Image: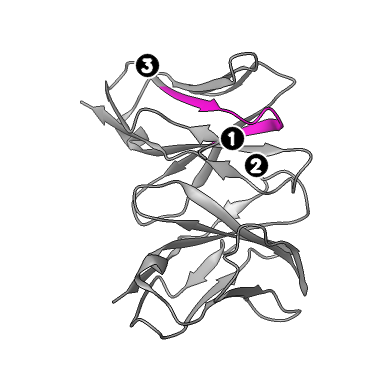
Amino acid sequence: NAGVMQNPRHLVRRRGQEARLRCSPMKGHSHVYWYRQLPEEGLKFMVYLQKENIIDESGMPKERFSAEFPKEGPSILRIQQVVRGDSAAYFCASSPAQGRMGTEAFFGQGTRLTVV
Amino acid sequence: DQQVKQNSPSLSVQEGRISILNCDYTNSMFDYFLWYKKYPAEGPTFLISISSIKDKNEDGRFTVFLNKSAKHLSLHIVPSQPGDSAVYFCAASALSGTASKLTFGTGTRLQVTL
């Protein structure tokens, strides 16, 4: 029973390039959350998605960032025209249904994005 | 505006002793609190949670205490073991918002020494 799978684990992009981060939720989970952890900080909520729907994107920067969770395939967090300040660890979590993130939600190992 | 604060960036405890990790919050709408444990290069792992209708929740060596009037919670680990060495994050959510939207503290690095 595979856990939440994120790929790639490490991603290096030059300033101005695009970054695509993928998250495959646990089997049976239809809710996906993206969090970002900047160096020396806690995780910050970015976006909450269900299949084909964005439920809450209050933590997403207004420009350059977008997320999707299509009917088929993984959830994608896309960052266009990356800047050095986007360098961070991006974590995805999934849960089987809407509700409290507790025992029912699991985090992936994260993607560490480095912008050079 | 840091709504969840963990004021101790690090803590060192001897094996077998009690580890106490503290967390303060400012948003009175928070009603559900969680502790996560994180090893380097891994994602956070859920440890224990508590609802605001309780003041204590226990699970094996881990106990979380909640003091609503002080807006303070703590995680007790007893006895501490070397494998407990990790970064511990306190997190909170509010019923009125997206139930799954967590606000995290900055973490406390626990080192359990032999």
Q: Nearer the viewer, residue B52 or B70?
A: B70
The tally of labels here is 3
Amino acid type shown at disc 3: Ile
Disc 1 target residue: B34
Pointer 3 residue: B18
Decide: marks 2, 1 in contact (CB < 8 A)? yes
Circles 3 and 2 on the same subunit = no
Foreground residue among A43 and A62:
A62
Magenta segment, which residues? Answer: B21-35
- Chain hosting mark 3: B
- The N terminus of chain A appears in which quarter of the rendering? bottom right
Residue B82 drawn at (x, y percent) = 29, 32
- Up-down relation of residue A87 to residue B41 (above or below): below
Q: Quadrant of residue B3?
A: top right
Label 1 secondary element: strand
Q: In x, y percent, where is residue B9?
A: 33, 33
Report whether residue A28 is seen: no
- Residue on which the image places disc 2: A102
